Amino acid sequence: MKRAKNNLSQRKRAVIVPYLLILLALAAFYVYLVKKPMPQRNEQKIEFKGRVKVALLNGCGYPGIAAQVKDYLIDNYSVNIDVLDWRNVDRNMFIYEKSILVVKKDNKEKLQFLQQLTGIKRYIYALNSDVNEEFQIILGKDFHKYFR
């Protein structure tokens, strides 16, 4: 006696295989975004006499992006930039679509320098004299526009 074909397993396979392919494609794209080296900017060095103390906060959730940007800033602007800290935003709230500068200690000249250096125009004031850094750079999902 012949056994009847199990059409249900073929249907399951027809549904599962496309989902697995999509999952694999998303994983490959995620790895591409995270592991992609940051190309160097083709800009002139910006003249500024002084040092700016910054903290880098990962606000987008891409693993290791704050450390990559720290390395970029140290390699290219160590004369003017002191990176005091790099970490995820508080409570790992990766909600930042756009990068932003947070002013901790008011200094218009340093703010303008940081805006020119990074290209990030958005900023907010959260003045706090108890912190060491003068600015925080919160890296949003658009970080690749500013740090290449």
Image (cartoon, rainbow, N blue to C red):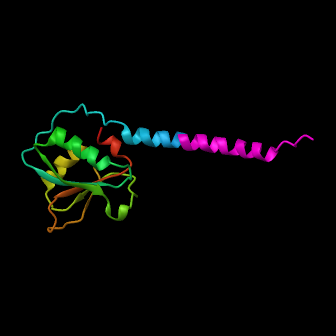
Residue 138 position in % (x across, y down):
30, 54
Q: Residue at x 24, y 44 (%)?
A: 118
Q: Nearer the viewer, residue 108 or 46?
A: 46
Q: Nearer the viewer, residue 126 or 93?
A: 93
Q: Is residue 111 visible?
A: yes
The quarter holding residue 41 reads top left
Query: What quarter of the picture does the C terminus occupy?
Result: top left
Decide whether residue 13 is among the magenta residues: yes
Residue 16 position in % (x across, y down):
67, 45
Query: What quarter of the picture does the N terminus occupy?
Result: top right
Q: Residue at x 76, y 42 (%)?
A: 10
Q: Residue at x 15, y 41 (%)?
A: 77
Look at the image and give the residue range highlighted in magenta. Answer: 1-24
Query: What main secondary structure does the magenta stretch of the protein show?
Result: helix
Q: Nearer the viewer, residue 7 or 64?
A: 7
8 sits left or right of 86 in the view: right
95 sits left or right of 112 in the view: right
